[in-house]
Image (spheres, coloured by chain):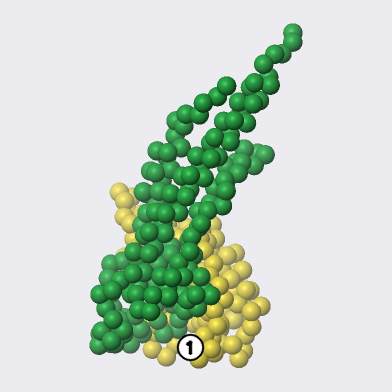
Chain colours: A yellow, B green
């Protein structure tokens, strides 16, 4: 398992375990970009390592990963208030928080780096909120 | 004991600060140029036409995601609108009362010119993101740090 995969596994576990997020998205947290998933179930969150910023190993085995965390909500069931609620929750549980998990094992933390605009995909009736986090872990 | 010369000291502090801010603004305009040039380079690929990308089975799509270039956030020029939408600028530097210097250089893709830019940068449910703004900035971060350090360190300003 690479450090990138460990970080994604750790974050996925945190998101699924959160009561507020699971009440909205259930367990639909995908470990790769939503476009790579065959028949994804919405609402969902997908995790994507931004290219060009992958694991940068140093002597300690520490990696820095920029991760885009995308929230996808069907427009027929959800509105802006829900997607902002998800973003607030992501910030509460990920920004400057530990992602350490001995069972994976991964150890590190991350911080919110960029919040994209709320994007409406009219053809598939989806609200999309991309946020970018940087995680440092080993 | 009377204090003399404080007016000269005060004038020199103001003069030095103004000189430093002027130099900072100049440096930030060059930082803007470095980032802007890198972003333009990264959205100016011409080695694949739309027809060729279709023949490759749409490499940025869910059907056949593949890495054509390194870094893979590089974007091909087709209509040229994305390149036209690239804008940049600076915000004049200022020093707060607490002594913090704030200086800004910015680059953006104007959605009024290229409304689809947001889909390229952040992706869609059918297409991977290509984080060309953040990626380009990260590519030149070390160069910018060195440039700023070199041009603001040991700055010499003539005082009275």
A107 or B104, nearer to the observer: B104
Quadrant position of the N terminus of chain B in the picture: top right
The 10 Å Cα crowd at callout 1, few under 14, some 14 to 19, many 20 or more, is some
**Which residue is at a point 42% across and 54% down the rendered structure image?**
B33
Q: Which chain carries label 1?
A: A
Give the residue pinned by disc 1.
A41
Front-most of B106 and A44?
A: B106
Residue B50, percent across and down? Answer: 31, 84
Q: What element carries label 1?
A: loop
Picture coordinates of residue B125 (x, y %)? 45, 83
Query: Which of the 4 quarters of the picture holds residue A126?
Result: bottom right
Please provide percent x and percent y for residue B138: 39, 57
The vertical placement of B20 against B131, above or below, is above
Near-viewer residue (B82 or B122): B82
Q: Residue furthest top?
A: B1
Count of number-bearing discs: 1
């Amino acid at each position: 398992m690479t450090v990138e995969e460990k970080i994604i596994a750790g974050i996925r576990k945190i998101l699924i375990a959160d009561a507020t997020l699971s009440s909205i998205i259930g367990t639909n947290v995908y470990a790769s970009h939503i476009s790579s998933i065959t028949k994804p179930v919405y609402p969902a969150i997908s995790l994507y390592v931004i290219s060009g910023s992958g694991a940068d190993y140093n002597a300690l085995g520490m990696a820095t990963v920029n991760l885009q965390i995308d929230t996808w909500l069907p427009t027929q069931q959800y509105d802006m208030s829900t997607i902002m609620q998800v973003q607030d929750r992501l910030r509460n549980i990920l920004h400057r928080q530990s992602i350490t998990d001995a069972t994976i094992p991964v150890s590190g933390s991350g911080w919110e780096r960029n919040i994209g605009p709320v994007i409406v995909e009219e053809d598939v009736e989806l609200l999309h909120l991309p946020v970018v986090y940087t995680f440092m872990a080993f | 004991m009377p204090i003399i010369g404080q007016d000269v000291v005060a004038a020199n502090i103001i003069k030095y600060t103004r000189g430093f801010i002027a130099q900072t603004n100049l440096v930030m305009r060059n930082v803007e140029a470095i980032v802007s040039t890198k972003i333009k380079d990264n959205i100016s690929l011409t080695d694949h036409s739309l027809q060729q990308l279709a023949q490759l089975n749409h490499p940025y799509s869910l059907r056949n995601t593949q890495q054509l270039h390194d870094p893979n956030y590089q974007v091909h020029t087709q209509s040229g609108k994305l390149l036209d939408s690239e804008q940049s600028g600076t915000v004049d530097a200022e020093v707060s009362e607490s002594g913090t210097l704030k200086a800004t250089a910015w680059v953006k893709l104007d959605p009024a010119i290229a409304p689809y830019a947001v889909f390229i940068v952040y992706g869609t449910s059918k297409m991977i993101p290509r984080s060309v703004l953040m990626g380009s900035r990260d590519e030149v971060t070390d160069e910018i740090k060195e440039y700023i350090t070199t041009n603001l360190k040991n700055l010499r300003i003539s005082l009275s």
